């Protein structure tokens, strides 16, 4: 369980979060709000990448996170397959290949990540996160740049590979996410 209690965060005198509280227990959550409202800041607070100005964040000290950041954070000069396994110790080449083939064309396996389209890079970032051994999966705007078909396939991929883990997705677009508990920022 992750709990935020009366969390506030400002950057350069601009308050991004103001006494925000939420509980993320077992299940899947949509952290919802318009662009610029503080969804990514909330994610960064949950991950411990930044500290709140006020309030408390409680999470198990041994909680393992898998994250797809808003930026793809890929190794542009490495292959798609290398990107999928690079941060996923213990994932076999076969499992990584099968995951890639669910969302990307077969000819992309040995392409450099930098050669992919924006939507393909986004799907690779999601693949990498979903392959990671974790207790909680956080996907920050995972559908950016995806057309409707790719979005639907990616969402199905995420749900099929969740395996009981806590899921937090940020998005301003709710299509296909109606079975997630909504947390408004």
Image (cartoon, helix red, strand yellow):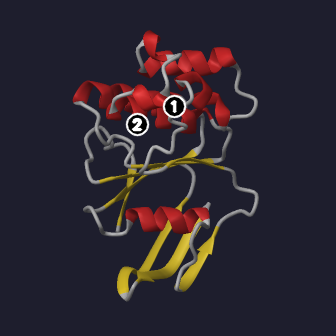
- Residue at 58% in and 31% down: 83
Up the image or down, 76 lies above or below 59; here it is above
Give coordinates of residue 162: x percent, y percent: 55, 35
- Residue at 39% in and 43% down: 142
| Label 1 sits on residue | 127
- Residue at 45% in and 10% down: 106
Give coordinates of residue 53: x percent, y percent: 52, 85
Name the one closer to the observer, 139 or 27.
139
Up the image or down, 185 lies above or below 126; here it is below
Give coordinates of residue 52: x percent, y percent: 54, 80
The C terminus - image quarter = bottom left
Of the image marks 1 and 2, the number of the one nearer the N terminus: 2
Q: Is residue 46 visible?
A: yes
Name the one closer to the observer, 57 or 79.
79
Query: Which picture quadrant has residue 18?
Result: bottom left
Give coordinates of residue 167: x percent, y percent: 51, 47
Label 1 crowd bin: few (<14), some (14–19), many (20+), radius 10 Å: many
In this view, which residue lies farthest toward the top?
106
Q: Is residue 156 visible?
A: no
The N terminus - image quarter = bottom right
* Local SS, label 1: helix
| Label 2 sits on residue | 122
Label 2 crowd bin: few (<14), some (14–19), many (20+), radius 10 Å: many
Up the image or down, 168 lies above or below 3; here it is above
Up the image or down, 12 lies above or below 120; here it is below
* Local SS, label 2: helix
For the residues marked 1 and 2, what is the alpha-carbon distance in whole angstroms? 9 Å
């Amino acid at each position: 369980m992750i709990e935020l209690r009366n969390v506030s965060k400002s950057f350069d005198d601009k308050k991004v979060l103001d006494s925000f509280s939420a509980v993320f227990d077992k299940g899947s959550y949509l952290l919802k709000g318009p662009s610029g409202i503080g969804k990514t800041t909330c994610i960064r607070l949950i991950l411990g990448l930044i500290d709140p100005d006020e309030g408390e964040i409680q999470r198990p000290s041994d909680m393992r996170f898998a994250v797809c950041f808003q930026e793809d954070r890929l190794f542009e000069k490495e292959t798609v397959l290398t990107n999928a396994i690079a941060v996923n110790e213990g994932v076999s080449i076969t499992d990584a290949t099968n995951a890639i083939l669910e969302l990307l064309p077969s000819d992309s396996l040995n392409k450099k990540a930098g050669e992919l389209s924006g939507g393909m890079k986004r799907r690779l970032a999601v693949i990498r996160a979903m392959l990671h051994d974790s207790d909680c999966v956080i996907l920050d705007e995972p559908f950016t740049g995806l057309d409707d078909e790719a979005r639907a396939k990616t969402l199905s991929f995420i749900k099929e590979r969740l395996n009981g883990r806590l899921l937090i997705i940020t998005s301003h677009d709710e299509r296909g996410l109606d079975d997630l508990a909504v947390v408004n920022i």
